[in-house]
Amino acid sequence: MGKIIAIATPKGGVGKTTTAVNLSLALAQGGKRVLLLDLDPAGQCAPAFGLKPKSIRGDMLDVLSFKKSFKSIIHKTNTKNLDFIPMRQLDYAHEIKLSRFTSDELIIKNTLSSEIYSYNYIIVDCSPSLIGTTTNILMAADSAIIPLKPSRYSLNEVVRIMKHMSLIKKKYNSKLKIEGLLLTMYEMNTRSSFYTKKILMKEFPNYLFNIVIPKNIEVAESTFHNKPILEYNPEAKSSKAYIDLAEEIINRN
């Protein structure tokens, strides 16, 4: 039975999609059978794999609206063991449609229930919000990774999503736990990085990953080449960090 890990935070711009894509790739390279599921209406996972809009055969919106089956929207990647369900970049009307479907808070859990046996890990890129697909997947997930970059604003959002997860755990999903807090865009010699890590170690010592993802200009460069950083430059510091993160997750499980 596979483990569902949501990459979730209500704060945008903290490396959520980058983490979802590269962690999935690193887990697959580590020999695990992985499904990457994009539930963010921005649909940025597809460009990360060089998948053009016309090549997307379907997404979760098609499944939720009973237009297509779950298995029919699974896309293969060039990486062994890694499957992918993209999300088209939704316009306003389709985003409203998605939010209408996800008002049934158990709809995604019920959809995934028969598929989790096919994978070791299902990694979900959530929308940068608490409502809608994020709440839906947290009701189904085993755990969540909360990415944050070194800033006071990111720390504030950590508290917000942890409170939300606590509510979901209490009322709907008793197995839900925090997989870990992941510091991204970390710069060793800056005060903001130092302060952020110091606060995390003081307030959330049991949740902080041993691994931090360093700030790396090649991560931004890789997006212009439509490749994850792990494929664009496997030797980059951030690539090695995501490999180490995957190993940490595999070892603890």
Image (tube, helix red, strand yellow):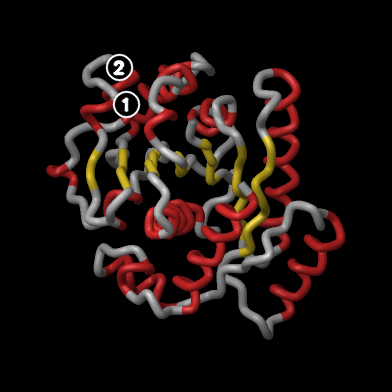
Q: Is residue 15 left or right of residue 226?
A: right
User: Residue 19: where, in percent of width, then height?
Assistant: 48, 57
Residue 56 screen position, x and y as percent: 19, 40
Residue 196, compared with residue 95, is above or below; it is below
Q: Is residue 93 visible?
A: no
State the residue at coordinates (37%, 30%).
95
Circle on res. 47: none
Residue bearing the label numbered 2:
65
Residue at x 31% of width, y 68% of height: 231
Residue type, numbered disc 1: Leu
| Amino acid type, residue under disc 2 in the picture | Ser
The residue nearer to you, when weighing 226 against 212, is 212
Does residue 104 sit above or below 34 in this rendering? above
The total of numbered circles placed on residues is 2
Q: Is residue 42 left or right of residue 241?
A: left
Residue at the spot x=29%, y=25% of the render?
Answer: 70
Image location of residue 203, percent across then percent down = 85, 55
SS state under label 2: loop
| Disc 1 crowd, CA 10 A, few/some/many (<14, 14-19, 20+) | many
Circle 1: element type: helix
CB under 8 Å between discs 1 and 2: yes
Write down the residue under mark 1: 61
Residue at 56 percent across and 32 percent down: it is: 141
Q: Nearer the viewer, residue 209 or 32?
A: 32
The single residue placed furthest to the left in the displayed view is: 54
- Image quarter for residue 175? top right
The answer to whether residue 185 shows anywhere in this view is yes
